[in-house]
Amino acid sequence: MTRHLPWILLALAGAACLGVVASVRGEPVNALWIVAAALCVYLVAYRYYARYIARVVVAVDPARATPAVRRADGLDYVATDRRVLFGHHFAAIAGAGPLVGPVLAAQMGYLPGTLWILAGVVLAGAVQDFMVLFISMRRDGRSLGELIRMEMGAVPGTIALVGAFMIMVIILAVLALIVVRALAESPWGLFTVVATVPLAMVMGGYTRWLRPGAIGEVSVIGVVGLVAAILLGQSVAASASLAPWFTLTPVALCVGLIGYGAVASLLPVWLLLAPRDYLSTFLKIGAIAALAVGIVLLAPPLRMPALTDFAATGRGPVWAGPLFPFLFITIACGAVSGFHALIASGTTPKLIASEGDAAFIGYGAMLMESAVAIMALVAACILDPGIYFAMNAPAAITAGDPATAAAAVTAMGFPVSPETLTETARQVGETTIISRAGGAPTLAVAMAEIFSHAIGGPAMKAFWYHFAILFEALFILTAVDAGTRAGRFMLQDLLALAVPRFGDTRGFVPGLVATLLCVGAWGFFLYQGVTDPLGGVNTLWPLFGISNQMLAAVALLLATVVLFRMKRARYAAVTVLPATWLVLCTGTAGLMKLAHPDPAIGFLAHARRFAVAAARGEVLKPAKTLAEMHRIVLNDRIDAALCALFLAVVAAILVYAVRTCLAVRRLDRPSVSEIPPAGATA
Amino acid sequence: MSALWRRLAQTARLMVGQPDYDAYRRHLAEHHPGREAMTRAQFFREREAARYRGGGGRCC
């Protein structure tokens, strides 16, 4: 009993914090109550639930040799200190996702997002990460596709690969869209981001020829360069001759980004990708840490209401649709993210020193990511709601002008003056902050607010805003570059099933073709999003959420099959419950995006409205010509087809999973394809 | 203190895909004493290329 006492106290403290959040009405709640409640939830969940899953549900065996021990080679397979590996795994799973989703979800108020992030991570997200890590660790660190093939069969394995590739495409498109929304018409922002290209190349040359392996040195050089670029950016934006060069329309930026993606993913990795990876990784960790310290020091009150009307009506300006299911796909990373299944079956399982570490790394790192999501949500909610909605409502609502935007947002019930919007833009060194959807600019304004209180005061706001934009754009561009490469290999694997020649991953022509196909695929969705009058985030983020949660459902179904195969079906509720929830969410959301009669939600209803009008020769806003009308119809239909594809993937995997579970239940002994503990060979 | 610093440096390097060179040398010395080891620079380049061969797993 005494050993449980501190944990009981911790649970009570967490409950008290949530109680404060729940009972304060009508006056702003301090953000620290939410942060403290979240930390208590994480610690208690880790101490009890993670331990229960590790010790009872899957029965990890610390004496059993891990791949890092059995196949040790000093390169891919290295038994690694658990704290070091935790950092590696966390850096790999935490990207833009946990920063963006919660910001978008804030349109419903801070409460729905907070509750979903906490419940989702404990019961679904961290469970998924840990289970996949465990499954892969018992099978020589194989990838998710191979694991599904081993445990469920070749057909579901291939289906999952197709699904994973489409997710990659959507993720790259939506990430690139965030960059476009943040950098369009922003010479300061664009200059600093463009400056990172030559900066990274200098760093690449340094590590290539001057001091190979001196990552610390070169990163210091890089960070100094970044700060110089931000400072220089201010002068560039102020210069009448230089500023126009870096003031691009969203469409021009989109074309540039697609071209960049194609070229960058074909360059040698040491030249651009690897050095920028250092900057983006270290900046990301630093910025997250600084945000945490900043929130604790500043202890800001939440100005967003706990629940906005949009939570009930489902007609919010940032994204359309009712709370269920759309909240649960809007916040993916931070609560549960299927993409992590690819990471947890990547390098991490090959580096685990002991099975006993798996819960700390798999479950623990996901809790940490969830904490990042909570901070992002808090950051969005400490802003004046009027500013939040002016920034995140699409141009179709705000009309892009301070006066019209202020009127539109005030009409939503969040009073704000045009002067406030202009003044906020001026403080962060931008000409406008209106309709900068995508989450990154909102978060940057919030970070500027928090950081400038700690360092520099209001005068430093513009610097901190562009620092935050740079840090987000930097790791998004790194992800676009690395993701295009990953997508290329995935595509080559898939194409090789039909045309074996594509399997040659070292060949120049197959690589080039697959790269261009991959860039073309995400470029298509990016262009569609950029030209979308509703801002694109409206269309693409739900698609991303559906696909990502679908992959999470697939991963949890795999985990269920493995539990059945281990003859541990009596514990299967641990994975069956979150899997069911995710199938419900993605299924409902997918069907609604597909077939909802409201054109604001359903792709086909939207397509129908425009097709009918076009047939009459009528041009509906925002299209300006009949050709644009037809393009909107085509885009809608492609989005609908994609939705249908995601639904088909999750349905197919569900059928295969249930069939496998039923089949192996009849066996009288375990049927897993684990590497047996006795098979210890070097 | 120096152990802590070492571990932090190791963590930072592994975050960008560079495992510990000394551990690699130890592994070779123990298990493959005859095999010639890569130099630190070769090791760095080999790991750098390997990190992105499959795309360099990272999340959204």
Image (cartoon, coloured by chain):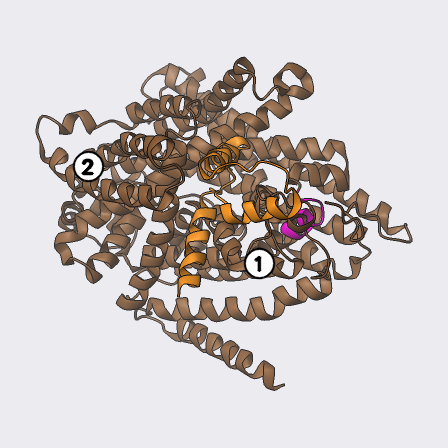
Chain colours: A brown, B orange
Number of marks in the rendered image: 2
Residue type, label 1: Tyr
Residue type, label 2: Trp
Q: Nearer the viewer, residue A242 or A160?
A: A242
Residue A326 seen: no
The 10 Å Cα crowd at callout 2, few under 14, some 14 to 19, many 20 or more, is many
Is residue A194 magenta-colored?
Answer: no
Residue A611 seen: yes
Q: Residue A188's mark?
A: 2
Q: Nearer the viewer, residue A174 or A218?
A: A218
**Residue at which label 1 appears:** A363
- Give the vertical position of A123 relative to A233 (above or below): below
Residue in the image at 55% along x and 71% along y: A44
- Give the vertical position of A220 relative to A172 (above or below): below
Q: Quadrant of the N terminus of chain A?
A: bottom right
- Give the vertical position of A260 relative to A27 (above or below): above
User: In terms of secondary structure, where does tag 2 sit?
Assistant: helix
**Which mark is first along the chain, 1 or 2?**
2
Is residue A134 magenta-colored?
Answer: yes
- Judging from the image, mark 1 belongs to the subunit labelled A
In the picture provided, is A564 more to the left or to the right than A356?
right
Residue situated furthest left in the rendering: A240
Q: Quadrant of the C terminus of chain A?
A: top right
Q: Position of residue A617 (x, y in %)?
A: 39, 15
- Judging from the image, mark 2 belongs to the subunit labelled A
Residue stretch in magenta = A133-141
For residue A343, what is the image quadrant? top right
Q: Position of residue A144 (x, y in %)?
A: 65, 40
For residue A161, what is the image quadrant? top right
Q: Position of residue A78 (x, y in %)?
A: 59, 48
User: In terms of secondary structure, where does tag 1 sit?
Assistant: helix
Residue situated furthest bottom in the rendering: A2
